[in-house]
Structures are given as structure tokens and as C-alpha cells.
């Protein structure tokens, strides 16, 4: 039997490595080392883990290119909906100036449940009961999951190195039922909004924070576990992608799509 995971990777003889270990938002390890091991053995490497994209995107992409292999990661943001492949394959040479969206489905569900009258703790318990929230929901409710997704999009689509720790981050713990009720009475909803803006290669803003949005915002209608991202480019002033209530099969499809794209020209 192999002594450890790296030994398993080296001795497997596989042509493709799928890496789906838990996310480490602080360093991206040990997933980064697993992907490096796969590339060093001449494999295509595919991951649904946001850590390596946030912390080692350029290094892993260059390693893959040097070996004639692919490093792909469609399932890291929006659960496999075509975000990275859209820009890579369908929108060459565009400049992404900004994006805004709801990238964490757990907090979106919690805020929607609070609109029905549940307390924050009751909403968390409900989300845990249906498998949306972890036993420890802090990664979601404190904005870490959203922040690492912002870092992934900035790294890949804007070409600007950004770590999750550098994203200005505020979670939803301070949103009270009274605040939700007040917003609802005013025809508004609380959302955990992810934003990034750049100009001439300089990052002007990268943030995750609760905001009240009105009916004139495309974020207003995003309910439950759905997600949304709107992109502003130099040629398209507004391009939006809505992902409605995804399931595990959505993430699985993103991994499959990456596999097919990796081997398409082989």
C-alpha cells in the first residue's frame, strides 16, 4: 500500500488527477502539493478546491503549460456553471473591469430564511438539517467562502494576484431579524455581496459585505441556494450568470466538463 497521498499519486499510473480535498482558505495546502505531484507525473489536474486557485494559480498554470497538460477548476466558483470556460473559450481578449454577485449559497439561504421570521440560529439549524451548512458554519457566515471565490475570480479573470486574506470581508453574523424586517418593509433585501473592480491592472476594490438591495438590483430576486455573478467588461457593460439551486451533480458536471476540455485536443 502507498505510504501517503503523494506516493499514491506517483504510483497510480493515472492520466488525470481529480483533487477534491477540503478547502484551506489560508494556504491552499495540502491540495497545492497534490496537484503539483500530479503535474510532475504528467497528469492533467482538475480540482473543485478553491484553495489552489486562490494561492497558486499562476504557478500551477505555468507548471501545466510546461508539461503540455491542463490545470482546470470550473467547479470552484458557481458549482460548475461556466464562468472560467466562458471567458477562456468564448470571450478572448476582453478586459474584465468589475464583477458583483452572490457567490455563497449558504448565506443567501440563511438571509432568505430570516425573511420568513426565523432567527439567525434557527436559520443555521435549518440549513444544517438539509445539508447546506456545515456543523461549524463559520466559513460561510463569516464570509471566508465568498472571499476565496472573489480571490479566484480576480486571479484568473483579471490577472491580478490576490489572496483571500486581502479581500475586505464582513460576514452576516450582525444581521438581526429586526434589520431583515426593516429592509423587507422598505421593499429591500439583505444580501452578502461580492465585489471587485480594477483599472489599468490595478485592483481598486475586492470586498465581501452585507448590503441592502432593492428591486432595481438583479441581486434582489436571487433566493434560496441560488447564486449570481454579473460581469462588466470593456465590450459588454453587463453580462450575468444565474445558477438556480444547484446540487452535487452541478459540481460533478463541472469536473466532467474540465476533463472533456483537457483531453479534447489529445
Image (tube, rainbow, N blue to C red):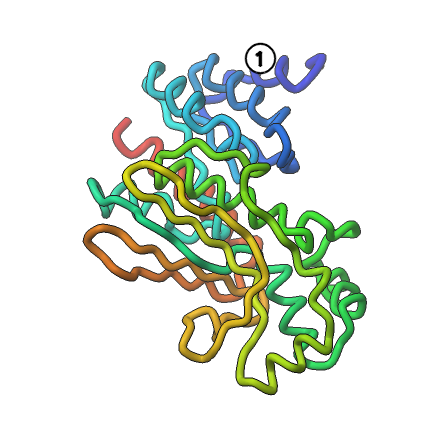
Q: Quadrant of residue 25?
A: top right
Q: Residue at coordinates 49% horizontally, 46% vertically from top-left?
A: 150
Q: Residue at coordinates 56% horizontally, 34% vertically from top-left?
A: 51
Work out whether residue 209 or residue 118 is closer to the camera in this orientation and state it. 209
Q: Position of residue 32 (x, y in %)?
A: 56, 24
Q: Is residue 72 left or right of residue 148?
A: left
Asked if one can make out residue 259 in the rendered structure from this viewpoint, the answer is no
Q: Residue at coordinates 25% horizontally, 30% vertically from top-left?
A: 265
Q: Is residue 111 left or right of residue 18?
A: right
Secondary structure, mark 1, is helix
Q: Quadrant of residue 201?
A: top left
Q: Where is residue 133 in the image (x, y as percent from the top left)?
A: 71, 57
Asked if one can make out residue 192 in the rendered structure from this viewpoint, the answer is yes
Q: In this view, does 237 lie to the left or right of 130?
A: left
Decide: is 235 above or below 112.
Answer: above
Q: In which quarter of the image is residue 85?
A: top left
Decide: is 162 above or below 266.
Answer: below
Q: Residues within 10 Å of mark 1 (few under 14, many from 20)?
A: few
Query: On the rendered image, what quadrant is the N terminus found in?
Result: top right
Residue at mark 1: 11
Q: Where is residue 202 in the image (x, y as percent from the top left)?
A: 35, 37
Decide: is 133 above or below 159.
Answer: below
Q: Position of residue 97 (x, y in %)?
A: 31, 48
Q: Residue at coordinates 74% horizontally, 53% vertically from top-left?
A: 137
Give the residue at the far bottom of this rendering: 185
Number of numbered labels in the structure image:
1
Amino acid at each position: 500500500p502507498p505510504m501517503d497521498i503523494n506516493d499514491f499519486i506517483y504510483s497510480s499510473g493515472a492520466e488525470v488527477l481529480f483533487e477534491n480535498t477540503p478547502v484551506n482558505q489560508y494556504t491552499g495546502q495540502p491540495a497545492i502539493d497534490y496537484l503539483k505531484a500530479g503535474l510532475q507525473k504528467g497528469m492533467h489536474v482538475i480540482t473543485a478546491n478553491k484553495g489552489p486557485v486562490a494561492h497558486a494559480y499562476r504557478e500551477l498554470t505555468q507548471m501545466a503549460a510546461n508539461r503540455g497538460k491542463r490545470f482546470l477548476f470550473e467547479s470552484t466558483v458557481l458549482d460548475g456553471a461556466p464562468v472560467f470556460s466562458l471567458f477562456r473559450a468564448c470571450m478572448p481578449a476582453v478586459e474584465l473591469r468589475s464583477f458583483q454577485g452572490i457567490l455563497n449559497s449558504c448565506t443567501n439561504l440563511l438571509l432568505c430564511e430570516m425573511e420568513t421570521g426565523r432567527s439567525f440560529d434557527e436559520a443555521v439549524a435549518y440549513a444544517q438539517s438539509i445539508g447546506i451548512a456545515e456543523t461549524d458554519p463559520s466559513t460561510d457566515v463569516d464570509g471566508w467562502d465568498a472571499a476565496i471565490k472573489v480571490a479566484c475570480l480576480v486571479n484568473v479573470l483579471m490577472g491580478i494576484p490576490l489572496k483571500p486574506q486581502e479581500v475586505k470581508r464582513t460576514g452576516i453574523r450582525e444581521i438581526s431579524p429586526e434589520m431583515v424586517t426593516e429592509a423587507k418593509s422598505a421593499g429591500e433585501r439583505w444580501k452578502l455581496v461580492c465585489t471587485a473592480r480594477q483599472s489599468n491592472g490595478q485592483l481598486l476594490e475586492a470586498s465581501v459585505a452585507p448590503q441592502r438591495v432593492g428591486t432595481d438590483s438583479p441581486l434582489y430576486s436571487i433566493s434560496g441556494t441560488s447564486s449570481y455573478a454579473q460581469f462588466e467588461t470593456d465590450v459588454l457593460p453587463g453580462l450575468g450568470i444565474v445558477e438556480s439551486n444547484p446540487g452535487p451533480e452541478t459540481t460533478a458536471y463541472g469536473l466532467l466538463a474540465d476533463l472533456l476540455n483537457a483531453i479534447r485536443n489529445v
